[in-house]
Image (cartoon, grey):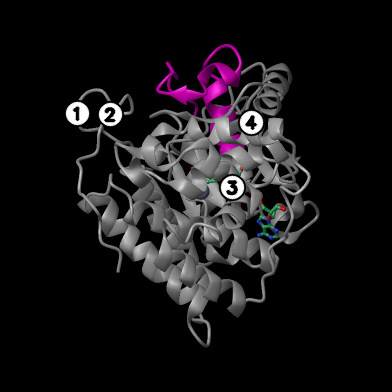
Amino acid sequence: MYINKEIQMPKTSTFQEEKYRNFPMVPRVMFGKGSFNQLGEILLPKRKHSEAPFIFLVDDVFKGKELASRIPTIFNDQILFISADEEPKTTQVDALVRRIKTEFPALPSGIVGIGGGTLLDLAKAVAILLTNTGSSSDYQGWDLVQKPSIYHVGIPTISGTGAEVSRTTVLMGPEKKLGINSDHTTFDQVILDPDLTQGVAKEQWFYTGMDCYIHCIESLSGTYLNAFSQSYGEKAYELCKRVFLENPAPSDSRDMLMMASWHGGMSIAYSQVGVAHAMSYGLSYLLGLKHGIGNCLVFQHLAEFYPEGVALFNKMLQKHNIVLPKGICANLNDCDFDTMITVALGMHPLWENALGKDWRTIITPEKLKALYQKI
Ligand code: NAD
Ligand code: ZN
């Protein structure tokens, strides 16, 4: 079991005042196999009028698949299939918002995101930008969103990121990869239907699932830990261990991983992630690597910071015959390393959570470079 090194009370995002943060939560959630079938009745009372459509942003992996035919469109609702091959960008969000505004004179009744973290983040960002002017890059940061977003629903089809429950939407912008962290980001409604995760490929299941596992390790071993985060983190950690290590695998492991993702997201909401996420942000900023695999590539080398967590991670890799790619940083030059190091070191709260107030004396650019060179 993870024991917190030093319990601190959660602070404001500016880390200047000792104030408690007042977090929004998803106000409505439906859980259960087949619950997707109730989407139509959930949306009905939220329809403003027949000219105000629901826009469904759907992972294009579902194009032509049974799930797409079950989306309850009426009136002038629209389904937009979007590729999740790349992580969401601010330019992509801006283009989607322009398209919706051009095609529909009235503000839509709502946005429904169906897919993994990529589609969920896109849905959150589009819902915000339909009521807030300018570019989505203007809102990357903390609490910059002024006006409430339009009604938005998140329906995950792969488990692990916790994007379904978080108050952030992570976007690659012109200058930085950073979330729109705001009270208006959180979904108004989430549907957790474990059946929707059925078609996920094994490697992807593992990488996205490990995002959740790493959320637990980083939250539970961080200095920001408190009873709120710990209660959710321990539950998610226990579920991850069962899903990825139990023999034979639990028959309801899809349900369990979906709930692990939810609890992992809740845990980091009131604490923070740590070393793996800071370094993974650097990796994906430079190389465009996706979040789940990026975290795994970094985490395997972090035994110094998370000995127990890395030991279990190695067991999970072995059990599922996952071979992580090697030599990712082999051909990078000094300038590339500097870019990754600058992005990673810029994530102050993550380092402070992981290593305490004196983190700068523990993690230096040289040390980070040595770690990146192992990847
Ligand atoms: P993803 O959305 O990037 O999807 C990964 C792959 O799985 C894609 O190829 C997708 O098409 C496929 N897929 C998804 N569901 C499937 C299904 N049911 N059947 C078959 N294939 C399916 O995956 P992810 O790991 O959930 O999300 C990563 C993104 O989430 C990153 O952009 C990351 O920045 C973001 N993220 C956000 C938060 C947050 O709190 N907002 C937290 C962590 C990560
Ligand atoms: Zn993560």
Task: Using the image, tell me which numbered label, if any, was put on residue 339.
Answer: 4
Q: What is the C-alpha distance between the residues marked 2 and 4?
A: 28 Å
Instruction: List x then y, in percent, for residue 360.
Output: 39, 35
Packing grade of label 4 (10 A; few <14, some 14-19, many >=20) is some
Q: Nearer the viewer, mark 2 or mark 4?
A: 4
User: Upstream in the sequence, badge 3 or badge 2?
Assistant: 2
Q: Which residue is mark 2?
A: 12
Q: What is the C-alpha distance between the residues marked 2 and 1?
A: 6 Å
Instruction: List x then y, in percent, for residue 180.
Output: 50, 28
Task: Using the image, tell me which numbered label, if any, was put on residue 370.
Answer: 3
In this picture, residue 330 sits left or right of residue 219: right
Instruction: List x then y, in percent, for residue 316.
Output: 55, 73
User: Upstream in the sequence, badge 4 or badge 1?
Assistant: 1
Q: Determine whether label 2 and label 1 are within 8 Å by CB.
A: yes
User: Upstream in the sequence, badge 3 or badge 4?
Assistant: 4
Q: Amino acid at mark 4?
A: Thr
The N terminus: image quadrant: bottom left
Relative to residue 256, is residue 216 depicted above or below? above
Q: Which residue is mark 1?
A: 19
Q: Amino acid at mark 3?
A: Ala
Relative to residue 116, is residue 248 depicted above or below? below
> Of 368 and 277, which appears nearest the observer?
368
